[in-house]
Every structure is written in C-alpha cells, then in structure tokens.
C-alpha cells in the first residue's frame, strides 16, 4: 500500500496501454506486485503487469492485471455462441481437468452456472464473466471465493483483470464494473481498431484461449445472438470490498492452470 499510486493519475500498463485512476483506485507496479504475490504464496504470472487496489487500507478489493500477448482476438465473434454454449465448453474442460484431479485423489470441481453471464461491450472492446463453481464436498452456497474476469482487447492481445471476492459482493457491485474498461486505453497504434489483417498475428484459438478452454462448441439448439436481454455491457471496477487478510488468502487457487478463466 505504501508503494501504491493513487488518483488522480494515468499509469502505464507495460508498453501497451494506460489506465486512468479515479476515486479510491490505486495501482501497484509489476516489481512490487510480484514480490507481494510471492510473499503471500499466490500465483505470480509471467505476464503480470501489476495490481489494482480499491478502498484504502482497511477494506480494499484487489485485482491482478496481466497482458496476454497471444495475438489479435476478434471479440465480436462472441455473438456466435449462446451463454449455454460457453458454459458447456467450460464444463468440457473441467471434466478433463477432473480426470487429472482424480489421479491425485483430489475431489472434482463442479461448475454450477454463471455468476455473471458473458457480457460484451463493443464500445470498449471488453468482455466480462464470472462462473459459479466449487469443489465437491463444499456447499454450493459457499461464495467466499468467487472470481470475475475482465478482458479488454487490443491489436496484439488483451489485458486481463481478475478480481477475487465473495460472489455476492461481485454481483452487488456489478453496476460499477464499467469503470476499468472505460479508463483503460491502448497506446496509439496498438488498439483493437489498429489490427491489420494479413499482417498482424491472430490468436490461434481465439476466444477459447480467453475463456481458458480447449475449444468452444455449440450446444445445438441455436446460435446465440448476445443482444437485448442476452447482452449485458461489462467491465470491472467499483466498490468491491475485501478484508486484507481474506483477499491475501483467497486471491488465486493453488496450481490453477495459466489461462483458467473460472
């Protein structure tokens, strides 16, 4: 906290973008953020950009920012899948993961549904979602370790912001989520609209990689058009509240696969 940069300010996110800080939002750069994660035995991703904190010393939420340089992802293709399609794809991936867990005598993970269905905002080229999942043997009503994911897409990849909090807290403050997507900007020439077909690298698995699954499939009843009631514009931000001790312990599950998005 002593090394966090507070509002008002605009901070650099690697060499790809910037983020405008406002209100109680604070930013911790990569080096200090990395030491914090290591000290607290939390996942320290190689593509770490920094940490975001909100709410001051006593009741902050905390989020990890990563820069995923997998190439251009056409987020507009999200309209090809209904929420049920995406959830089925995640369940497929978890089923495979559970086979490996069984060999280690670990209980399976269960995916119950969406906490926040995928929400695409074409104005900010962002995508937000949160999956309701838990380990078998733990009550599905236990929402103490929920994660919401925000991806903001650019020319060479995307920024991902992962916020961990109680599930009820994440839903309660969903109205504040657009703040981060609105305030994040790619530097000139590296934005989503700067992509050059035939010249720039395209992410091999597209949105499947973003959701952390092997592939996306259609359930079969119809191809979803995420418009109207089925489209909710989203980003992450606002007033999530976590105690400092709680957020340090629940930020990331141990040994989570690098691109797991649940």
Image: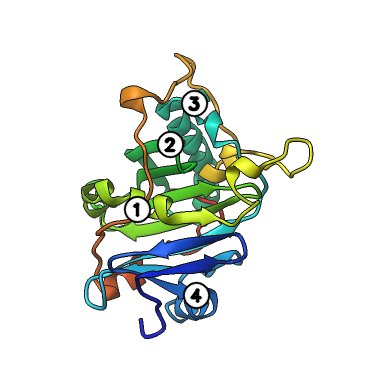
Q: Is 64 above or below relative to 244?
A: above
Q: Residue at x 49, y 16 (%)?
A: 220
Q: Nearer the viewer, residue 153 or 257?
A: 153
Mark 4 vs mark 3, CA separation in Å: 35 Å
Mark earlier in primary sequence (4, 3): 4
Mark earlier in primary sequence (4, 1): 4
Q: Nearer the viewer, mark 2 or mark 1?
A: 1
Q: Determine which residue is flagged by label 3.
A: 79
Q: Nearer the viewer, mark 3 or mark 1?
A: 1
Q: Determine which residue is flagged by label 1.
A: 179
Looking at the rendered structure, the secondary structure element under dot 1 is helix
Q: Determine which residue is flagged by label 4.
A: 29
Looking at the rendered structure, the secondary structure element under dot 2 is strand
Looking at the rendered structure, the secondary structure element under dot 3 is helix
Crowd class of label 4 (few under 14; some 14 to 19; many from 20; radius 10 Å) = many
Mark earlier in primary sequence (3, 1): 3
| Whether residue 21 can be seen here | yes
Q: Residue at x 65, y 54 (%)?
A: 69
Q: Position of residue 229 (x, y in %)?
A: 30, 25
Crowd class of label 2 (few under 14; some 14 to 19; many from 20; radius 10 Å) = many
Q: Are marks 3 and 1 in contact (CB under 8 Å)?
A: no
Mark earlier in primary sequence (2, 1): 2
Q: Position of residue 222 (x, y in %)?
A: 46, 14
Q: Determine which residue is flagged by label 2.
A: 120
Mark 2 vs mark 1, CA separation in Å: 14 Å
Q: Is residue 154 left or right of residue 142?
A: right
Q: Are marks 3 and 2 in contact (CB under 8 Å)?
A: yes
């Amino acid at each position: 906290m002593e090394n966090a940069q507070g509002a008002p300010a605009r901070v650099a996110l690697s060499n790809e973008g910037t983020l405008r800080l406002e209100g109680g939002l604070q930013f911790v750069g990569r080096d200090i953020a990395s030491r914090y994660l290591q000290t607290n035995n939390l996942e320290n991703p190689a593509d770490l950009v920094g940490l975001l904190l909100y709410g001051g010393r006593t009741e902050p939420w905390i989020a990890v920012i990563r820069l995923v340089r997998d190439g251009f992802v056409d987020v507009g293709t999200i309209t090809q899948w209904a929420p049920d399609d995406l959830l089925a794809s995640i369940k497929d991936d978890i089923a495979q993961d559970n086979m490996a867990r069984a060999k280690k005598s670990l209980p399976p993970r269960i995916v119950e549904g969406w906490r926040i269905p995928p929400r695409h905002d074409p104005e900010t080229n962002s995508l937000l979602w949160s999956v309701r999942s838990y380990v078998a043997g733990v009550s599905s009503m236990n929402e103490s370790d929920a994660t919401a994911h925000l991806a903001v897409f650019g020319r060479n990849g995307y920024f991902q912001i992962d916020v961990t909090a109680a599930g009820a807290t994440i839903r309660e403050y969903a109205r504040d989520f657009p703040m981060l997507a609105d305030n994040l900007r790619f530097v000139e020439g590296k934005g989503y609209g700067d992509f050059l077909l035939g010249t720039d690298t395209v992410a091999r698995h597209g949105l499947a990689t973003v959701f952390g699954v092997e592939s996306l499939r259609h359930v079969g009843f119809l191809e979803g058009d995420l418009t109207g009631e089925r489209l909710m514009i989203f980003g992450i931000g606002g007033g999530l509240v976590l105690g400092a001790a709680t957020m340090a312990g629940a930020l990331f599950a141990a040994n989570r696969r690098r691109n797991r998005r649940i």
